[in-house]
Amino acid sequence: MQTLSVFLEADKPWHSEMFRTAIRKIESKVETGSVTIEYKEEMRGTYHVFRFVSWSSEEYTLETRDVVRSFIALVAVEWIVRVMEPDVIQGVLAKEYGPELAQEWEAVLPHIQHVLLDAEAGQTRDAATARKARIYRKIHAYLQDNHELVLEGFVRFRLKEYWDELAEAVEWGIEEYLREKEYREFVELLRYFISLQEARYRIVHVVPRNGKPYGLFDEKGQVIRLDQLDAMISHSEQEFRDEDYLVSALVTLAPLKIVLHRSEEKPALAETLRSIFGERLSYCGACAYCLSRNRTNLDFRKPTHYNT
């Protein structure tokens, strides 16, 4: 029989409840074989103690003694990821970026997790599993020489590399979140501006072209020229991408309907235009131009379903 104890701060009852939840989760997933593990809870000073007692129906060996360490390490990892990680992220947001952004931490968290996923992109295993494995090894190694684990203290002082990685992910995740938030606000502004404009064209066709900017055509197949916009951009010190030019052009033209040809080749562009122009945007993939291999010019001399 052996006993290992995990200490949690008693003034945080939610932490203890989440630790019980982690125990139940690991119990449902892990088969301990001949080893029986039971735990009892008790108060010891300022700590809420989970005391794990284990014994084996077979002769104790290094392997059977190791089962309870592995079990506790798995529970601790689950608890750290579910409890400490969000707490630390929210704390970093409040300390480094102010209470306003900390209140948005639930919206920021997916971006931070996305950064952590990218950091693990070169690994074959799932990123979350890889991060858990690193924590598990440290806790398991600690329990080989110690029978008591003060969990919050261990997290703060023994997992420095992990928290450094998390702090960096918070920084990058916040930048990603703010960029997306700024983009959403910009899109809303464009949508409002478009709603106030009087339409200059009934239909504008957007045609991707190899090695050239997008072609813009009216419903009669005439090329739409934007001399004023071209002059403005040519005098601008800012570098304009083709996609930026296209959005600016369409906002200027304010058409009632936009037809994006061969949209499957430009999924990101299609998503951007949909977010700005909404139901004004439609897609074409079945006209003579879209179906042709040599990409002949649009021909509007005959009525077509995409020109109505």
Image (cartoon, rainbow, N blue to C red):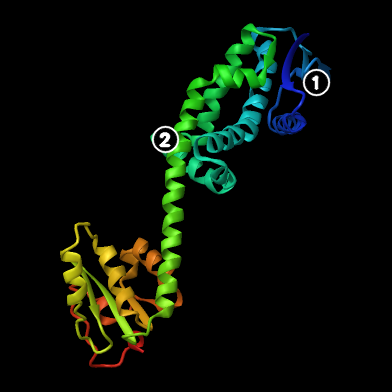
What residue does disc 2 label? 119
Q: Residue at x 43, y 78 (%)?
A: 195
The part of the image, by quadrant, that contains residue 230 is bottom left
Amino acid type for the residue under numbered disc 1? Tyr
Name the amino acid type tagged 2: Ala
Looking at the rendered image, the quarter that the N terminus falls into is top right
Location of mark 1 (residue): 39
Question: Element at badge 2?
Answer: helix
Residue 210 seen anywhere in this rendered image of the structure:
no
143 and 225: which one is in front?
A: 225
**Disc 1 on helix, strand or loop?**
strand
Q: Nearer the viewer, mark 1 or mark 2?
A: 2
Residue at the spot 33% in from the left edge and 74% down from the top edge: 251
In the image: residue 151, left or right of residue 55: left
Look at the image and tell me in which quarter the C terminus lies: bottom left
- Residues 178 and 22: in front is 178
